[in-house]
């Protein structure tokens, strides 16, 4: 099996990397955080690169690319700790293209591809604890369509998004709806998250919404799995930068007249960081390659990848701070922001313990047992 990236994928990576290096420096990111954690201009810049159109079918104005291309791009977004929720466009395109009626696709997918519309997932509820089958939001059918009553938490860029994908109970069964932010009865309360990005609480009170699919749980699982694969790739990009910066620091910092990189104990810790990074990278590849497999196989693969990524993110982030000493936790130094980014990514769409439980619950009866 050939695991090399194609020429097109490598060119896509190079284009994304050049943009991050030139247009999204650490100073630019700090200014973006101070300005509120989301910039529509930056999101439009990503759209001009064609990145918001990546997973949109060609029939709706997109590039029609797949999970591997999305992974390549998200690694580069991780290198720059880009605040704008590009992964949400991948999630929305995936779900709408597979589940939405043709009329809904024709209205929204071209706008997602062009960057005109930012559609984000709004699914987390306070009592759910990462479980996707726990939903208290309610939907009702009316003579004109459907209405939603819901309260969703930690919605990426929720007070700037144009629409939300919202799971809600319809006649006792979970369905998925598309809710516009400007719809009557919709209110948002935005705030800055731990890593400097923007999120919001989103509430709807008998708000008109569009039905995407009555197969709400299956569509939600696909959206979250797509987002989890993006989290894995983004984390690899962050950790790759953390390792590079930490190695540079060890080569520059001196004690007793020599660079501390010459100390064997520190070299061993750096080697352990590198090992965790490469384990994470291989599992990120695995997660993306499994996105188009049947649902049960996909869910099992994503959970496995997230367990390994959780361990790697915690280890690499904590070791980087330890090896830098006091400077590693100062706001002026980039490693402290990378550490916060990894901490938040580790808890996005389920932390390590949650996914370990998912792996355990999806084990087959003969898992790890040879034939008698």
Image (cartoon, grey):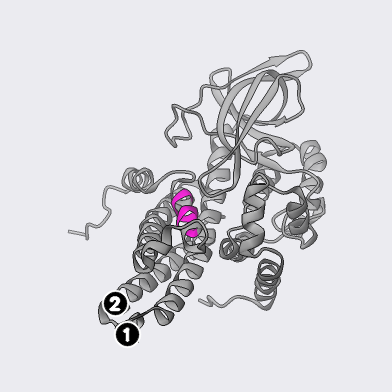
Q: Nearer the viewer, residue 332 or 118?
A: 332
Is residue 264 in view from this perspective?
yes
Q: Which mark is residue 178?
A: none
Asked whether residue 85 is in view, the answer is no
Q: Is residue 216 left or right of residue 161?
A: left
* Quadrant in which residue 139 is drawn: top right
Q: CA distance from mark 2 to mark 1?
A: 11 Å
Taking depth in this image into account, of 247 and 372 the one nearest to the observer is 247
Cβ atoms at labels 2 and 1 below 8 Å apart: no
Q: Which residues are magenta?
A: 338-344
Dot 2: within a 10 Å radius of its alpha carbon, few (fewer than 14), some, or many (20 or more) residues?
Answer: few
Outermost residue toward the front in this view? 256
Which numbered disc, 2 or 1, marks the residue that appears first in the sequence? 1
The answer to whether residue 107 is magenta is: no
**Residue 125 location (% of width, % of height):** 50, 29
Label 2 element class: helix
Residue drawn 29% across the image and 77% down it: 268
Question: What quarter of the picture does the C terminus occupy?
Answer: bottom left
Q: Position of residue 290 (x, y in %)?
A: 51, 58
Element assignment for label 1: helix
Residue drawn 47% across the image and 67% down it: 242
Q: Residue 183, percent across and down?
A: 76, 25
Q: Is residue 246 left or right of residue 3?
A: left
Residue lying at the far top of the rendered structure: 143
Query: Residue at label 2?
Result: 268
Q: Residue at x 60, y 39 (%)?
A: 199
On residue 262, which mark appears? 1
Determine the residue located farthest toward the left in the rendered image.
Answer: 372
């Amino acid at each position: 099996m050939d695991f090399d990236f194609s020429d097109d994928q490598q060119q896509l990576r190079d284009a994304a990397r050049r943009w991050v290096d030139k247009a999204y420096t650490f100073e630019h990111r700090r200014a973006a955080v101070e300005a509120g954690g989301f910039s529509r201009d930056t999101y439009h810049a990503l759209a001009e690169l064609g990145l918001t159109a990546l997973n949109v079918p060609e029939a709706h104005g997109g590039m029609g690319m797949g999970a591997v291309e999305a992974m390549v791009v998200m690694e580069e977004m991780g290198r720059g700790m880009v605040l704008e929720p590009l992964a949400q466009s991948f999630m929305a395109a995936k779900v709408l293209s597979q589940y939405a009626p043709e009329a809904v696709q024709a209205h929204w997918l071209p706008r997602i591809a062009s960057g005109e519309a930012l559609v984000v997932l709004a699914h987390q509820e306070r009592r759910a604890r990462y479980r996707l089958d726990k939903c208290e939001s309610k939907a009702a059918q009316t003579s004109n369509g459907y209405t939603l009553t819901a309260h969703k938490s930690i919605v990426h860029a929720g007070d700037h998004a144009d629409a939300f994908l919202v799971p809600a109970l319809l006649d006792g069964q979970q369905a998925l709806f598309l809710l516009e932010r400007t719809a009557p009865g919709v209110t948002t309360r935005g705030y800055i998250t731990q890593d400097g990005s923007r999120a919001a609480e989103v509430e709807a009170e008998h708000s008109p919404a569009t039905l995407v699919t009555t197969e709400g749980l299956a569509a939600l699982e696909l959206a979250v799995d797509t987002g989890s694969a993006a989290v894995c790739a983004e984390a690899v990009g962050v950790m790759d930068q953390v390792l590079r910066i930490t190695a540079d620091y060890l080569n520059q910092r001196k004690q007793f007249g020599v660079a501390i990189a010459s100390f064997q104990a520190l070299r061993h810790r750096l080697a352990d960081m590198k090992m965790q990074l490469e384990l994470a990278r291989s599992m990120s590849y695995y997660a993306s390659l499994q996105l188009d497999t049947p649902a049960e196989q996909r869910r099992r693969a994503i959970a496995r990848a997230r367990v390994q990524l959780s361990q790697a993110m915690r280890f690499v982030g904590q070791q980087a701070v330890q090896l830098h000493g006091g400077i590693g936790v100062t706001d002026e130094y980039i490693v402290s922001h990378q550490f916060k980014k990894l901490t938040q990514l580790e808890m996005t769409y389920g932390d390590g313990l949650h996914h370990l439980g998912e792996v355990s619950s999806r084990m087959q009866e003969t898992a790890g047992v040879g034939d008698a």
